[in-house]
Image (spheres, rainbow, N blue to C red):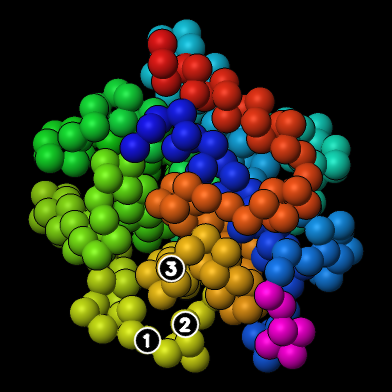
Amino acid sequence: MNGKASVKNIIYGVAIGDAAGCPVQFFKRGDVKKLNITDMVGHGTYNKPAGTWTDDTSMTLALADSLADTMALGKDVDYTDIMKRFEAWLFDNKYTPEKRAFDMGQTCSVAIFNFRKGIPAIECGGKRIDQNGNGSLMRISPIVFYLQKKFGANMLENEAFVDAAFEVIQNVSSLTHAHPVAKLGCCIYCTFLLEVLNGRQKSDLRESVAKAIRNYILRKKEFTDAATYWERLFAPDFLESGEETIKSSGYVVDTLEAAIWCFFNTENYRDCIIKGVNLGDDADTVCAVSGGLAGLYYGEFPDDWIEKLRGKEMLDRIAEKLEAALED
């Protein structure tokens, strides 16, 4: 897969999905169904124009921007710099489509306040079991480009590289979400993305990710308990689950299950996102997560949705910076 195209596909995949889900965020599923949404619409929860993305995309862009700048200097990932970008988003309204930050999650906000108090970056995230929201999952996707550049395209075939890469993923998660369940969820999602980057076909994708995660857990016993929270995602009959069993809450497990379910039960980007929108609840994040994966896999987006999308200049600028850093 072309690396340059991949960056933009993930960035746009996240942003379009986020924007599509934004109007129905926190809506009950039954209420969303009554609206019969089949397109990208506006207003709703935050009364924003169609194409407006939320904190999911803002924090994704902040991470991508940090990675682009540090990689361009030949440096490794800089966790302090990433937190400074998050701080600039929360307090200075950077990385937003309308110069105003909104839809800030509590755990992310507390972590950024912790950083402002002087707590080291990777010690800022919530460590309690009740702090397993989806705030690190929603913005983690750009890290896969750094990892592939650092460890190579075949990194998943080398246990030492996997362990080192997963440590980076967990550190990036720990900036805001430091509980093992959230950290492992980010590793699972990034493994899906890495496999797609390597050209893995959809029919083999879930099995290959499950194998990589199982092998990792065997080596890292400290994640044994956290792994039990993710068993349903890899159960043989998970993809056949009825919609009524799929939760779309802000809990990291629910979000990733819903995103994977939407991706595997549709055949194109538009259908994947509309399926997520109609789940309601934390639909913007479900669609941002599924959108990153579907955008990377399909590499095509509805023209009319791109036309509606706000902040495209910023999306393009940061994607191009990261593309350039990958070529150095």
| Mark 3 → mark 1, Cα distance in angstroms | 17 Å
Question: Where does residue 97 sit, x and y in percent of width and height?
Answer: 79, 41
* Residue at mark 2: 246
Which part of the image, by quadrant, shows the C terminus? top left
Residue 137 visible? The answer is: no
* Nearest to the observer: residue 102 or residue 3: 3
Q: Which mark is residue 241?
A: 1
* Nearest to the observer: residue 291 or residue 77: 291
Question: Where does residue 179 sit, x and y in percent of width and height?
Answer: 41, 55
Residue under the image location 12 percent in, 40 percent down? 157
Is 89 on the left-hand or right-hand side of 162? right
Which part of the image, by quadrant, shows the N terminus? top left
Position above or below: 280 against 61: below
* Residue at mark 3: 267
Q: In which quadrant of the rendered view does residue 30 lie? A: bottom right
The boundaries of the magenta stretch are 33-38
| Mark 3 → mark 2, Cα distance in angstroms | 19 Å
- Circle 1: is it few (<14), some (14-19), or many (20+) Cα within 10 Å? few
Residue under the image location 82 percent in, 64 percent down? 42
Q: Tell me whether circle 1 and circle 2 mark residues in contact (CB < 8 Å).
A: yes
Position above or below: 111 against 127: above
Q: Give, as a three-letter code, the residue at label 1.
A: Ser
Question: Where does residue 264 sit, x and y in percent of width and height?
Answer: 38, 70
For residue 34: magenta?
yes
- Circle 2: is it few (<14), some (14-19), or many (20+) Cα within 10 Å? some
Q: Give, as a three-letter code, the residue at label 3.
A: Glu
Residue extending furthest toward the top: 73
Mark with earlier residue (1, 2): 1
Residue under the image location 23 percent in, 27 percent down? 152
